[in-house]
Structures are given as structure tokens and as C-alpha cells.
Amino acid sequence: MTPLLFAFFAAAGNLLGAAVVVRHARKGMRVIEVFVAFGAGFMAATVILAMLPEAFEQAGAPLFVLAGFLAVHLAQHVLTPHFHFGEETHRVSASAGVSALIGLSLHTFFDGVAIASGFLVSGGLGVLVFLAVLLHKLPEGVTMASVMLAGGQGQRRAMAAAGALGLATVAGVLLTRVMAPLAAHGLALSAGVTLYVAASNLVPEFQAKRGLSTAVAFFGGAAAFLLTRALLARWLPG
């Protein structure tokens, strides 16, 4: 299994999410709302139960986890003046799309680092990390495309911006394969990034909404991780 192939599949998720926004597919948006909750549960479980235990085998890992966590906050909420995860429904300035692209690109880059780092440990961990990444690629594409459209940009630019996020993920895989520091500490860094995305980006998008569906999806995401890990342990031992 090659991490690069998985990165391209993950990148396709960005384009699919953007296409839902561009085509005004409201039914698709409702499905993605459930994906947000399900993905948050799966991602949180992946970080806590799979990524962190492996990362902590390396010296200094907690510091790199914290660095990844803080770096996403810096990119998305300090250097980026207007950002929230999910569909943008209000008019924003044209520059908001550029700043959102910059803010999101950091964490999509580390999506690729996470996939590559997971496969460096084992095929099972690589697949688990890939699934955690893939599950938030759809809402990520929604975020990017909707901000571009809300800033007065056309559909092509909205899709191009989502494509750029996907390319950042591919770049993360490629650079992890050739840069020793990323290969050594990428899992810890990306664990911090993934934890931030799950807890600070995805959870706030649904926790204020009433209804059983998102709660079931959130806990179902964590349960799905446990089931997937058990199946992978049988299919991909070691």
C-alpha cells in the first residue's frame, strides 16, 4: 500500500465537498453535517487510542504534539481574520477566501504528513489515519468553497481552492518521505493537528445543534474506530 495513493483519495474528498457547495446540493449538505459529527468521533478516537501511543515512543513527542496543536490555532484563528469550519452563509471580503486557504493549507499539509507517518509505523495505523483524514475532507471542501463563493469568487475558483487543499495533502506525503525530521516527528505533530481539528473545529459545528442524529453520529464515529481497528488487526497484522 502506498501512502501517496491514499493521499490522492483523501484529496478527492476536498473536491467532493466543494462540489456539494457549488451545485447547491442541500441534501448533500445534510449528509455532510452528519459526517462532521461522525468524523469528529472517529478522529478523536484515532488520535487518543492510535496516534498518541505510537508517537510517544519517540523522545520529545509531547512537545511536538503541542506544537502541532498550537500551529493550527495560529494559522486558523490568529493569522486568519475570518474563519470557521463549515459552510459560510454570510457575505465576506474577497481576501477572506485567500486567508482561509492559507489557514486550511497548514492542516491539510499535515493530513498528508499524518497518512505518511502512519504507514511508516504499520499498514493498519496508516489506514486508520487515512480514514480519519478522509472523514473530515468533505466538510473541509465545504468550508473552502463556501468562503470563496461568499467572497464573490466564481465556482471555478472555489473548486480550484479546494483542489489546492488536496494538493497540500499530497505534498505532505511526499515531503515526509524525503525529510528526516518529518519522518521522525510527523506522527506527533500531526496528532496535535488532528486533535485540534476534531475538538476545536468539528465538535463546535454540531454540539450546539439539538437532535439525536449528530449525537449518535459522534459516538458512532468513536465506535467505528474500535471496530475498524479490530478488523484491521485481523487483516493487516503488525
Image: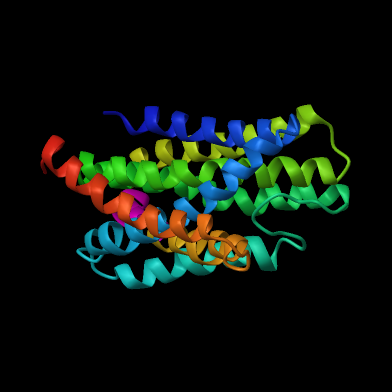
Total numbered labels:
0
Quarter of image, res 59? bottom left
* Residue beneath the point at 54% across and 63% down: 203
Q: How far from the left and from the top, in percent, is residue 4?
A: 38, 30
Q: Residue at x 30, y 51 (%)?
A: 225
Q: Is residue 106 found left or right of 145 in the rendered image? A: left
User: Which quarter of the image is occupied by the C terminus?
Assistant: top left
Which residue corresponds to the image point at 41% horizontal and 38% vertical from the top-left? 173
Q: Position of residue 2 (x, y in %)?
A: 30, 29
Vertical arrangement, residue 104 with respect to residue 197, above or below: above
Q: Is residue 213 left or right of residue 98?
A: left
Q: Residue 171 location in percent, x, y?
A: 49, 37
Please state if 29 lies on the left or on the right of 181 as rendered. Answer: right
188 or 134, which lies in front? 134
- Residue 187 in the magenta stretch? The answer is yes
- Horizontal and vertical percent for residue 12? 53, 30
Residue 104 in the figure: left or right of residue 228: right
State which region is magenta. 181-190
Q: Residue at x 35, y 57 (%)?
A: 222
State which quarter of the image contains the N terminus.
top left
204 versus 1 height, above or below: below
**Where is residue 157, by image quadrant?**
top right
Q: Main secondary structure of the magenta part?
A: helix
